Amino acid sequence: MNNMDLEQLNRQNFKSLSDALAMPGKITKIKSVFDSHLLAVANLLFFNEVTYYYSGDEDITLIEAITNPKITTIQEADYILSDVIDTRLILEAKKGDYLNPDFSATLIFKCEDFNSYSHLLSGPGIDGKKEVNLPCNKKFIDVLMKKNSDYPLGVEIFFINSIGELIALSRTTKVEVR
Amino acid sequence: MRYGFLDEDAKKEIRRATLKAIAIPGYQVSFASRELPIARGWGTGGLQVTLAIINEEDCLKVIDQGCDGSVNAVNIRNFIVSVTDNQTTLDTVCADIIQSRHRIPEEPMREGQTLVLQVPYPEVLTNVEADSYKQKVMHANSDYAKLWVLLYEDTAQFGDSRIGHRYPVMVHDRYAMDPSPIPKYDTKKLNNNKALILLGAGREKKIYAIPPYTKVEPLKFEDREFKVESFANKKCARCGASGVFMDEVHTNEGEVKFYCNDTAYCDKQLEKGAR
C-alpha cells in the first residue's frame, strides 16, 4: 500500500469520524488499514504533534513509524485506544481546562458489536432524542456522564465494532440507560 | 499535485481542530493556519477547512455573499477543483460541501451536508475587550457581561442593537460566538440547522463549529424582539420571489429594484416559472 492510498483512506475515514461525532448515535463505516479498523483510525488521527496511549494487542508499530506521534501515559494522552472497554481509561483521561477545553482526550474503544445495551441519547447533533444500542453498561455510562458533567470539560468516545462500524458520544451528549 | 493541496500533516492538524470544534460547539479551536495561494483575509480559513475535509465523493458549491459567480467564489472554486478534480454544483440541494462567504443559502440544508463559512473576525468579544488573553478568560468563565452592557447601551440609546450583521449568538447555552458576517436574516437559520456548520478564520487561526440540531440563539433581552432585515411587500425583479433575503439595487434611472441575494435560488425560481 502506498502513501496516496493511505491519504485517500484518511479522507474517507475522516468523513465517517466527523459525521459520527457531529451526530452522536449515528453509525458510520470505517475502511480498514492493514486489515484493522483501529489502525485505520490511528492512521487518520495520529501525527507528530499528538500523543497517544494504547492498551491492546494490535501491532501499531508501523502506523506509529508512518505518523510519528508520541507515546505517553493515560493521563497525558490526546488519544487513548483500547481493545477493551475500560472505565479506568475514562476516569484517568485528561478532560482539558476552562481556558482550553480542547486539550482533552479522545477515547477509541474496540468492541464486538453495538447490541449490548439500549440507551437514549440527547444533545447537539441529535434531533430531540434518539434510541441507540451501545456496547456499554450503566456503570460505564455513569462514569462517562460524571466525567462530562462539567461542560465544556470532558472527553469524546468512539466505539468501533468488528465489522468497522463506528459510533460516537460527544461530551455534549446526554445518555440515559433504558 | 497532492490531492487537496495541503500536506497530510496539515490536514490532520486541521481535522483534529475540526473534531474538537464539533465536540465543543461555539468554542474557538486554534490551528496553525497555512500559507495558501490566496492572501489571508480572502477566505483562507474556510478554504483550509474545505481542503482538509473534502474527499473524492463530495460535490462542492462555493458562494460569495449569495452569489456563485462573484470573483472570490469563482477563484476559490477553480482553485479547489484544480487541486481535487471534484465535481461542483450551483444547486444547494445537490452539494455535499458548501463554502460560503457571509450568507447561508436560501434553501434549507439537510443532514449530511457541511456548510463552511469564511470568517474574518472570529472573536465575538473583540468590540468589548481588546486583550486576547482576557477574551479567552471571559469565554472560560462564560462571562459575557460586557456584551450585555453593549446591547443594553444600544437598546437604551437607540431602542435596539445597532449590530447589523455578525450578530452575536449563544451556542448550546454556553459560548457566545461570532457567526461570521452573515445578515441578521440568516442568524435564525443557525438554530437547529440540519447541516454541520464549520467556521474557519485563516488570518486569526481559529476553527469553530455548530453541529446539526444545536441550539443557537441571538443574544437579546427577553423583552426585545430579535428583528431581522425586512423585505415585506418586496418581490425579486428577476424571478418574482418574495420572503427571501434581497439586494437593493438603485438603477441609473433612479428606480429602486430588489433581487434575490442567493443567485442559485433565483435561477431555480426562474426555471420553475419558465416551466
Image: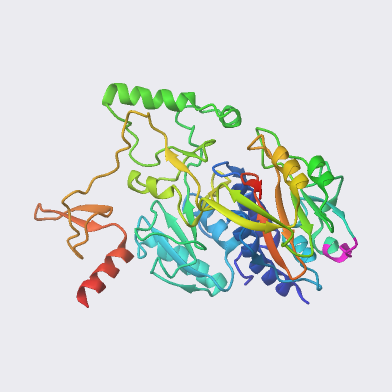
> Residue placed farthest to the front in the image?
A178
Determine if residue B10 is in view: no
- Judging depth in this view, the residue of B266 and B24 nearest the camera is B24
- List x then y, in percent, for residue A46: 76, 57
Relative vertical location of residue A12 with respect to residue B211 in this rendering, above or below: below
Q: Is residue A145 left or right of residue B86?
A: right
- The location of residue B16, given as percent across then percent down, is 67, 53
Q: Residues in magenta?
A: A57-63
Q: Position of residue B32 (x, y in %)?
A: 64, 49
Is residue B20 toward the left or the right of residue B176 in the image?
A: right
Residue found at x 55% / y 48%: A124
Q: Position of residue B234 (x, y in %)?
A: 17, 53
Up-down relation of residue B173 to residue B158 (above or below): below
Which one is in front, A25 or B251?
Answer: A25
Question: Can residue A58 be found in the magenta stretch?
Answer: yes
The quarter of the image holding the N terminus of chain A is: bottom right
Left or right position of A14 against A87: left
